[in-house]
Amino acid sequence: MSGFVEPGKPNVTDYTAFLRGNVGIPVADLPDDSMWITATLGIAIAQVNLALTRLVRPMYCLAVYNLGADRLINFALDLPQRSYFADLRKSLGVTVFAAGLVSSSSDAGTSQSLQVIEAAQKMTLTDLQLAKTPYGRAYMGIAQSYGPTIWGLT
């Protein structure tokens, strides 16, 4: 987390740097003063389990920034005459409903099958939605690595 101003505490400056450097969102599509930056950071801070702060402080920040990026991708509105977030949501399949995770696929007729693996049997709709972006999956990986009750599944 080198390069962050305050790597031990989630903040707008470091979150914006994460969005620019790690996620690759250009300023033209998300200005530094966008309400979506502060809104999704606030959502993530409110939702990430505070137990992560007692374990490894930098991991808490990474969990917050990854969850925030996922929420940003899911919720942000595009600027007029721009389609960055709509295009990203389409490419990731964010708006497509899936009742499970893909367990296999084939080339013949683009067939896919869904399997409810043990870890996913109790996933909420929010958990399934998080699995659609790399940042949601990164967040769940961080949270889950500290135990099943940290990330919401009990």
Image (cartoon, rainbow, N blue to C red):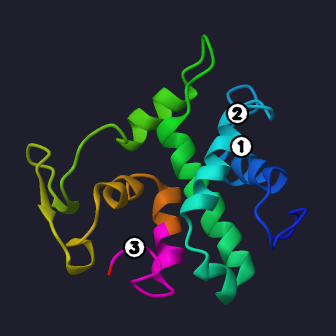
Residue that lies at the very extreme toward the top in this rendered image: 81
Q: Which residues are magenta?
A: 140-153
Dividing the picture into quadrants, the one containing residue 35 is top right
Is 153 situated above or below 43?
below
For numbered disc 2, what is the local secondary structure?
A: helix
Considering the image in quadrants, where does the C terminus appear? bottom left
- Please rate how many residues cluster around mark 1, counting C-alpha atoms within 10 Å: few if below 14, some from 14 to 19, many from 20: some
What amino acid is labelled 1 in the image? Answer: Thr
> Marks 2 and 1: CB-CB under 8 Å?
yes
Which residue corresponds to the image point at 56% horizontal and 58% vertical from the top-left? Answer: 67
Is 70 situated above or below 36?
below
Residue 38 is marked as 1
- Please rate how many residues cluster around mark 3, counting C-alpha atoms within 10 Å: few if below 14, some from 14 to 19, many from 20: some
Considering the image in quadrants, where does the N terminus appear? bottom right
Which residue corresponds to the image point at 58% horizontal and 51% vertical from the top-left? Answer: 43
Residue bearing the label numbered 2: 35
Cα distance between the residues tagged 2 and 1: 6 Å
Cα distance between the residues tagged 1 and 3: 24 Å
Residue 151 in the figure: left or right of residue 116: right
Q: Position of residue 14 (x, y in %)?
A: 81, 56
Residue 129 in the figure: left or right of residue 140: left
Dividing the picture into quadrants, the one containing residue 28 is top right
Closer to us: 146 or 110: 146
Closer to us: 111 or 29: 29
What amino acid is labelled 2 in the image? Answer: Met
Q: Say whether residue 31 is magenta.
A: no
Mark toward the start of the polypeptide (3 vs 2): 2
Mark toward the start of the polypeptide (1 vs 3): 1
What amino acid is labelled 3 in the image? Answer: Gly
